Every structure is written in structure tokens, then in C-alpha cells.
Amino acid sequence: MFGLMPNGILRQANLRMLFERAKQYETASFKGLYHFIHFIEKLKLSNGDMGAAKTIGENDNVVRIMSIHKSKGLEFPVVFLASTGKQFNLMDLNQNILLHQDLGIGVKYIDYERQVQYDTLSKAAIRNKVLIETLSEEMRILYVALTRSKEKLIITGIKKDYEKQKEKLLQQIERYQKEKGKINAILVKKYIKYIDWILLVYFYEQTNMQAIAELKTYTKKEVLAFCETIKEQDIDWIAMLEQKEIDKTKIGEIAYKLDSIYPYELSTQIPTKTSVTKIKQKQQESVEISFPSPKFTRKEENIKLTNAQKGTLLHLCMQKLDEKQDYDLGKVNQIIDNLVKNEIITEKEAKHINPAAILKFTQSKIWKDMKQAKKINKEKPFYITIPAKEIYQEEATEDILVQGIIDLYYVNKEDELILVDYKTDFVQSEQELVNKYKKQLELYEKALEEAFHKKVKSTFIYSTYLGKEIEVLK
């Protein structure tokens, strides 16, 4: 028993549109599923929207509601131009600083002694220029609106105290005569609503306008009288439902829909993209996540660094080591001092860095091997696609895009690929580290092997706490 999904036609159209978008995306310089998913995610974060697919043709017999900008280039038998009583948006003219591409910058003058401020001549000039440009643009928009109809144009707008406003308008028309057959520009600038401009033309050309247009005014009471009033019906819905004959077939359909289990529910719970850190957290039995209070609410001297933050600082220093140099404690301290001097870390953070642990690494077998290496890479990001079942241990057929950062890898003098991962954990034994990070390192190995098309010869964990390298056997 199958039922039709609601909005099925629109759903199909949206899927076709997604396919077309993906096909267009492939013609650009970026290719692949990862880049397309990344593009969609950025679109979501920026509140962008590709819009829903259209299921109505251009010639369908429907009422279309659109902005004036959207209607440009289109024509319709009958057009309603509504809300003409709305004032133009001139908020930008009230800013303290005004900018213009030709006139430059206009600002207020502030007299601190008298505690007053007023517009400078430059600001007044720019304000007047921007006002004229804004009104000119609104005229162009109004022209578009007035030329969309083929047969009939209906213009609606609301005016408060219409009769008083009309009397003032007629006085202005009498005061400002036409100049070379056109309405005086001074009068046009006095009004900032479409309805006022339209009424200006109507009353200036009243004799001619009566043959082509009709002006109708309605009070609020008259408008409400046009509206149909719906009387509330007193219906006993429970009694009506109890008397209604029950269709057992319909009950079966409802029960089927409510009890149905989506066969691909697991796929909805598996992410399309994840990170090595999240995979590691999932594989541990329990993960303690804490949310410290924001730094701006705490005094610098009271801020306590977590073990993870201390580990990050140690990683940063080890990144700065130069394999061509021989180090002593003074040179290691110089690295830390430079990080403080360049405002990469604070003095308080520098006090939590153990220079002896960094120096110990420069005395390791890994360091000696690196000094003769053909190629060295540090803190390199990677992306790799792996089957979901390898992470979630479920019968899932999807793949997941995994991202991470490799601390260090190098090609030694024998042209062998070596992987190294720094760990700052406080542990009791080497095996504890291996058990904890083996899966993570396997992902790193796979990423390197796919990139270099060669096997990783050796994988090491360097423990700053134990002060030694630990080879992870395969």
C-alpha cells in the first residue's frame, strides 16, 4: 500500500534543479562531491538560498505577486500597484558620515566646547546629491510599475487625512507652475511617496486625466463594509465525529503510515563529513566536554589553561623547530620568547610551556633522521573518503569525508615515508598511547599512502610526557 507524498511535483522539481546545479558546478574550476558539499554548506552559513524550483509556467492562468524590480520586462493584462502610500527609504541620509563616489566624504562638525554639532557644507551638499539620486531611482522604478499593464492598471494607497492633504497639494500646484511643460522639480522633491507623485500628475493634468483615469477615495468604514463578515458557527465537533461512519480501509492506511519504518534511517544519522578528532571521541567510551566561560568575563591572571591548551602550545613550539639547527635550552627559550614578542601567545601561556620537553625531542632518533631527510612537511591538512561502516560499525553503504591535520611526515634518505604524531597526554605506559590513537594513525597512513602512492614505512608517536618515540607496529 503506497500513498502520494505531499507536494510531490515540487519535490521532483527541486531534485531536478539540484541535479542541474551540480552539473553546472562541475563545469566550473572546482570539481568533485567534496567541493560541491562545501559550496552548499557555505551557502547555508551565509544565509544564501538557491530558491525553490518553479512548477508554474509563464503562461499559466494565475495571479502573480512580485516586486516592481522582478516585473521588469514583463507585461500582464491587469496590474495592481499596491502600497503606494509607503514612504521611500531615506534613512541613509541621516547618517553622521555620508559617502559619494564623486563628491567624497561629508561629516558633521562637532564643537566640543559648546557641546553642539551640525552638518558641514560638504555633508549638506552630499545629502542633497544623494536625495536627488534616490528620488531619480524611485522615478525609474515607478515608471516600470506604470508600464506593466496591457489593459488596466489599478493603483492603491493609503493617505491619512486625505482631504486636508489634497487641499495642501492643490495650494502647492497653484504656487509652483509648470516649467517648460514639466512639473517643478522643487515640488517633486517635497514629496517622498509614489501616491503623492501620482496625485501631483493627476491634479496638474486633471482635465486630460479624467478621460483616461478615475480617482476613487474610500474611508476606512467603507472599505470594511466591502469585506465579508464570517459569523462564528457553534458546532459540536465531538458529536459530529462520533456520528461519522468510520472507514476501516482508511484506518489501515493511517496505521501503516504511522508504523512504517524508514529503511534508510541509519543514513540520516551518519554525517557526510567529519573530522579525525570527532572519530576519536566517538570511539572512546566517554568524552568529557567542558565549556569554559568566555575570556572577556575573566581576568587574565585567573585564566587556567586546560591540558589540551597546554598541549596545543607545545605543538606550536615544535612546529617552529628548524631541522638544520642544533638546539640547546637557550635556543628553545628563544623560540618561546619570539612567539610572545610577535603576540602569537601571551606571557602567561609561555609560562606553561616546558622547554626541556621540546629540547628532548631534538635529541631523539626521529630528529636525527629528519636532519638527513629529503622532504619534511608539518601541520598538513588532509581529506580522505572512507566507508562509514569502518567508523560506525553498522551495515552502512555510504562513504564519509574525513578531514584532519598531520603533525609531521617526511621522506628519509632511503626514500621511505615516515609518519610522526606528537602526543602530550599524561600516560602510564607506551601501550596506552598506542591503543588510544592507533585508529587515528591508520587514517593518517591511508591519507598519506593515497597522496604519495606508496606505503608508509614506519609510524611513530612521540610522547612529550614520556620523552621518547614509540613505533606503532602494523
Image: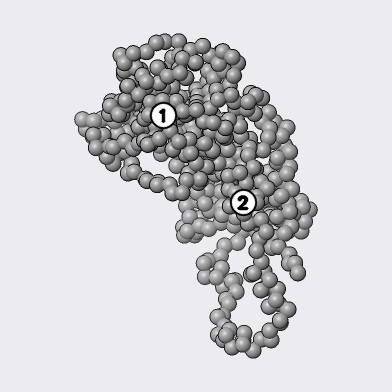
Q: Is residue 354 left or right of residue 365?
A: left
Of the pair 420 and 38, the residue shown nearer to us: 420
Q: Earlier in the sequence, mark 2 or mark 1?
A: 2
Circle 2 packing at 10 Å, graded few (<14), some (14-19), many (20+), is few
> Where is mark 1, residue-wise?
463
At a point 66% along the width and 66% down the height, the residue shown is 260
Q: Residue 414 shows which numbered tag? A: none
The amino acid type, in three-letter code, at marker 1 is Ser
Q: Is residue 81 left or right of residue 337?
A: right
Residue 25 position, x and y percent, is 69, 36
Tell me if residue 22 can be seen: yes
The amino acid type, in three-letter code, at marker 2 is Glu
At a point 44% along the width and 38% down the height, the residue shown is 432
Of the pair 112 and 244, the residue shown nearer to us: 244
Q: Residue furthest left?
A: 113
Label 2 vs label 1, nearer the camera: 1
Of the pair 296 and 441, the residue shown nearer to us: 441
Q: Residue furthest right?
A: 59
> Where is mark 2, residue-wise?
394
Circle 1 packing at 10 Å, graded few (<14), some (14-19), many (20+), is many
At a point 46% along the width and 33% down the height, the residue shown is 128
- Quadrant of the rendered image containing residue 78: bottom right
Residue 120 position, x and y percent, is 36, 29
At a point 62% along the width and 46% down the height, the residue shown is 389
* Mark 2–mark 1 distance (CA, rounded to whole Å): 33 Å
Q: Is residue 100 above or below residue 51?
A: above
Which quadrant is the C terminus positioned in? top right
Residue 414 position, x and y percent, is 59, 14
